[in-house]
Amino acid sequence: MSSDPFGALTVERLDTSNYLIWAPRMEYFLTTKGLWEAVTTDDAPVADCRKARAIIGLCVTSQHLATIQRSKTAKEAWDSLAAIFKTKGTALKLRLRRDLSSFKMAAGEPLTKYFARAKALQDKLLESFPDFKEEDIFWPTVEGLPSTYDTILTIIENTADAELTLDSVLPKLMQVEQRQRGPDRPDRSNETALLAKPSFTFRRGPNPTSGASAPAAVRR
């Protein structure tokens, strides 16, 4: 058994989209090894610098290995990765902000699916904006609901001690959704097109002129 209490710790490898989470975790990991100074200074012991560079190389996916191999020191490797993701991070933040500002419920979309999309967007925003708060996703989400939910939202907004979180408001909104469907009625939005089309079948009945059976169209 290893005597190192942190020996079992691992860091998820850096890919193309997780730098903002990877970087602080990598810092914490190198700190537990006593190697973070090798990343922040140019005069760290050579042995520490090599160890830190090797650990960084082991904690990135193959597409970043060339960047590590071109770097002579751990600090150079770290700074090179930071420079790569600085530009990408700015573009990602702008896109996420646009997604948040235009977030709304699609026609016929179930509440549970809509709120799942909101939580997925919240997770992405938290990666890019560590100070992102629950209310920052709550208001765009409820404002993106159709007008059929206005009454219950007004009640919630005017309740002094109301908990303004996605998890707390979803059950209340689902009651409205259920009333819109009717009691014990499942969501059959996929059947709308079928029900809107007339359906015909043919039944045989007596022909008043010939006595023979003739097909008669019956609309259902």
Image (cartoon, helix red, strand yellow):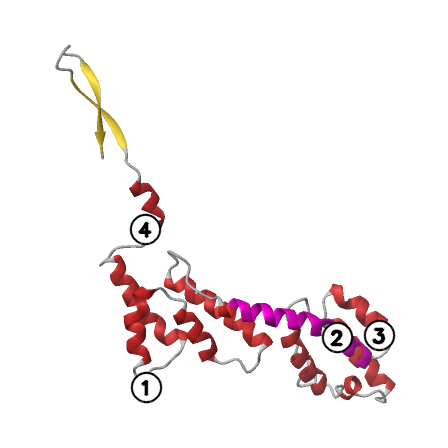
Query: Residue shown at 28%/34% (left/top)?
Result: 199
Instruction: Point out the residue furthest to the top here.
Output: 210
Dot in front, 3 or 1: 1
What amino acid does circle 3 point to?
Answer: Ser
Q: Residues within 10 Å of mark 1 (few under 14, many from 20)?
A: few
Task: Give whichever of discs 4 and 3 has the lower sequence position.
Answer: 3
Examine the image and state in which quarter residue 159 appears.
Answer: bottom left
- Which numbered disc, 2 or 3, marks the residue that appears first in the sequence? 3
Residue picked out by circle 2: 83
Q: Is residue 33 visible?
A: yes
- Inspect the image, locate mark 1, and give the three-letter code of the amino acid beneath it: Asp
Q: How far, Cα to Cα, is label 3 from label 1?
A: 55 Å
The image shows residue 217 at horizontal and vertical percentages of 23, 26
User: How many C-alpha atoms fall within 10 Å of the one at disc 2: few (<14), some, or many (≥20)?
Assistant: few
Residue under numbered circle 3: 71
* Residue assigned mark 1: 161
